[in-house]
Image (cartoon, grey):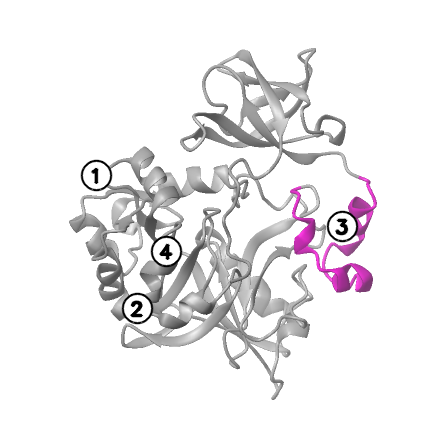
């Protein structure tokens, strides 16, 4: 895809003005880093508050058809989580499944108001996702894509104090709350969530107001703009899988360690795509599982690096890897047979043709700081 073919988010001009290095990502021209660089941006977010443009992601409303007030029951045909039990003002993580129980995408779904469900999916997947949802839910629910909205993420230990100055209600929210509010002079949907492992918020706002919201937040000395490079290293430290790398249509939520994304009521009912496979895997029939690795020597093990046992036999591969700025050493996520997934298991990663020692460790690598109660 040429630069001319890339889409631009409503914040493109703001990124260029701030000196961002722009790169192709999910069909958009996106900032990978600003003048400070990835390492400083990463550490700033861990210590203060980082502001991310995630407007490339797909936002949509799913509403009931034929006079139905809630589309949740219909939506559950294609996702793993319990959305009929989702309370107003709450948000829940789930995965969109194929008939084999593989993950088509992972997504966030909220009930911020009485206007059906508010769904956010990954940017590279959104066209396919919403086509599948519309097809599978035809006659039961409608999908309205919100192409006229931007999405910002404010993340870090100072995020709550920063946002409370503009949205007082935000201070009363806890992790996975979602509300439709009026702020910055426009209608916004705010959730206390994000993909860094830090406390923080995601803010959906009309595209026309995005730059004003962005600049207003950046006027606070505690906030700096953060690019995709630090976003990736932050989510890796938080042990959060990334679609297209750690998750794809061959990987099930159980293999990926996302058992929590399959609701208890859904397990009992078994009324969703791929339920047979997932039920067997929940019972222990697994050939591979996600492992989190501390690389004990040498260079970082990047995506595609092979994982070997202590004898040198290849048993799996790395799906995400890099240097962890908060820890000072390389880490990785990958897949291996369950027999090699126990904490403390000694393994090897093959980096540039040479084996390097690694050890299975707990997830997350860096403790999360979600605010679950006030």
Q: Residue at x 40, y 48 (%)?
A: 26
Q: Nearer the viewer, mark 3 or mark 1?
A: 1
Which element type, helix, strand or loop, lies under badge 2?
Answer: loop
**Between marks 4 and 2, how big is the CA–CA gap?**
11 Å
Task: Tell which circle, 3 or 4, labels the residue nearer the N-terminal end.
Answer: 4
Residue 35 tag number: 1
Q: Are marks 4 and 2 in contact (CB under 8 Å)?
A: no
**Between marks 3 and 1, how big is the CA–CA gap?**
45 Å
Task: Tell which circle, 3 or 1, labels the residue nearer the N-terminal end.
Answer: 1
Residue 66 position within the rendered picture, expressed as x and y whole percent measured from the top left: 61, 87
Q: Residue at x 31, y 40 (%)?
A: 41
Task: Please state which of residues 236 and 374 is positioned toward the viewer in this rendering.
Answer: 374
The number of callouts visible is: 4
Which residue matches tag 4? 159
**Between marks 2 and 1, how big is the CA–CA gap?**
27 Å
Residue 273 lies in the magenta-colored region:
yes
Residue 265 lies in the magenta-colored region:
yes
Which residue matches tag 3? 278
Residue 210 position within the rendered picture, expressed as x and y whole percent measured from the top left: 28, 65
Q: Nearer the viewer, mark 2 or mark 1?
A: 2
Left or right of 340, for residue 9:
left
Q: Residue at x 49, y 38 (%)?
A: 236
């Amino acid at each position: 895809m040429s630069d001319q073919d890339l889409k631009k988010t409503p914040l493109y001009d703001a990124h260029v003005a701030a000196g961002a290095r722009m790169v192709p990502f999910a069909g958009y021209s996106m900032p990978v880093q600003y003048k400070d660089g990835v390492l400083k941006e990463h550490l700033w977010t861990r210590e203060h508050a980082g502001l991310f443009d995630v407007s490339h992601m797909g936002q949509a409303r799913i509403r009931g058809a034929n006079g139905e007030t809630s589309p949740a029951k219909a939506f559950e045909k294609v996702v793993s989580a319990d959305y009929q039990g989702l309370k107003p003002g709450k948000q829940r993580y789930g995965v969109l499944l194929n008939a084999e129980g593989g993950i088509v995408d992972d997504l966030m779904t909220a009930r911020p108001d009485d206007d059906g469900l508010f769904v956010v999916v990954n940017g590279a997947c959104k066209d396919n996702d919403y086509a599948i949802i519309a097809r599978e839910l035809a006659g039961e629910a409608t999908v309205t894509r919100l192409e006229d909205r931007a999405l910002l993420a404010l993340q870090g230990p100072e995020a709550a104090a920063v946002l409370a100055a503009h949205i007082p209600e935000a201070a009363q929210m806890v992790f996975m709350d979602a509300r439709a509010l009026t702020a910055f002079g426009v209608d916004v949907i705010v959730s206390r969530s994000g993909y860094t492992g830090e406390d923080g918020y995601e803010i959906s706002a009309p595209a026309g107001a995005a730059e004003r919201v962005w600049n207003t937040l950046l006027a606070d000395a505690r906030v700096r703009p953060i690019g995709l490079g630090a976003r990736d290293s932050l989510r890796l430290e938080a042990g959060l899988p990334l679609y297209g790398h750690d998750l794809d249509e061959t990987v099930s939520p159980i293999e990926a360690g996302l058992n929590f994304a399959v609701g208890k009521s859904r397990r009992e009912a078994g009324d969703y795509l791929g339920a047979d496979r997932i039920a067997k895997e929940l019972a222990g029939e697994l050939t591979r599982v996600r492992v989190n690795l501390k690389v004990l020597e040498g260079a970082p093990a990047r995506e595609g690096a092979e994982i070997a046992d202590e004898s040198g036999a290849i048993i799996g591969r790395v799906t995400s890897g890099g240097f962890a700025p908060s820890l000072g050493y390389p880490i990785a996520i990958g897949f291996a047979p369950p027999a090699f997934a126990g904490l403390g298991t000694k393994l090897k990663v093959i980096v540039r043709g040479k084996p390097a020692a690694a050890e299975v460790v707990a997830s997350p690598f860096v403790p999360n700081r979600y605010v679950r109660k006030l």
